[in-house]
Image: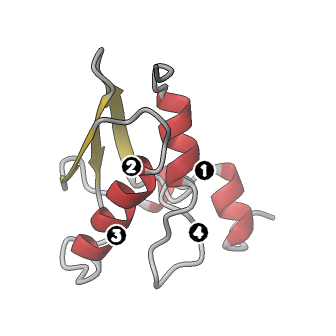
Amino acid sequence: MSADVTVEEVRTALKDVYDPEIPVNVIDLGLIYNIEVDDESRVHVEMTLTAAGCSMGPFIAQQAEWAINEVEGVKDVEVNITFDPPWSPDSITEDGRKLLGLDD
């Protein structure tokens, strides 16, 4: 019997996923737009990239999928990349801003 998967568990797993060009995880970069977990422990994530032409996009999405699959109880994972709305630096969390040296 597996425990129900929570959005918070998925969010925590995604904190281990990084854009290889930026030393901040995808959560703190503001790249994750939505996380949904259904009644059957299937996870759906909507994410974006810092730039539409980012060649690392498929790699980052694959890393996200692998990280989520490590969460106990997850049955299936779907990671979709969207550019609507486009990412902006305003999406970076306070922790992310500190890591990037953007805060005073």
Q: Pointer 4: residues within 10 angstroms few (<14), some, or many (20+)?
A: many
Specify the label residue 24 is tagged with.
4
Amino acid on which the number 4 mark rests in the picture: Val
Looking at the image, tell me whether mark 4 or mark 1 is earlier in sequence order.
Answer: 4
Amino acid on which the number 1 mark rests in the picture: Thr
* Residue 49 visible at all: no
- From the viewer's perspective, tell me whether residue 42 is left or right of residue 99: left
Q: Nearer the viewer, residue 74 or 16?
A: 74
Which residue lies under the disc numbered 3? 60
When the figure is inspected, residue 84 is found, relative to residue 72, above or below; the finding is: below
Amino acid on which the number 3 mark rests in the picture: Ile
- Disc 2, disc 3: CB below 8 Å? no
Q: Pointer 1: residues within 10 angstroms few (<14), some, or many (20+)?
A: some
Looking at the image, tell me whether mark 3 or mark 1 is earlier in sequence order.
Answer: 3
Q: Residue at x 81, y 64 (%)?
A: 104
When the figure is inspected, residue 9 is found, relative to residue 40, above or below; the finding is: below
x and y percent of residue 58 in the render? 22, 72
- Disc 4, disc 1: CB below 8 Å? no
Which element is circle 2 on?
Answer: helix
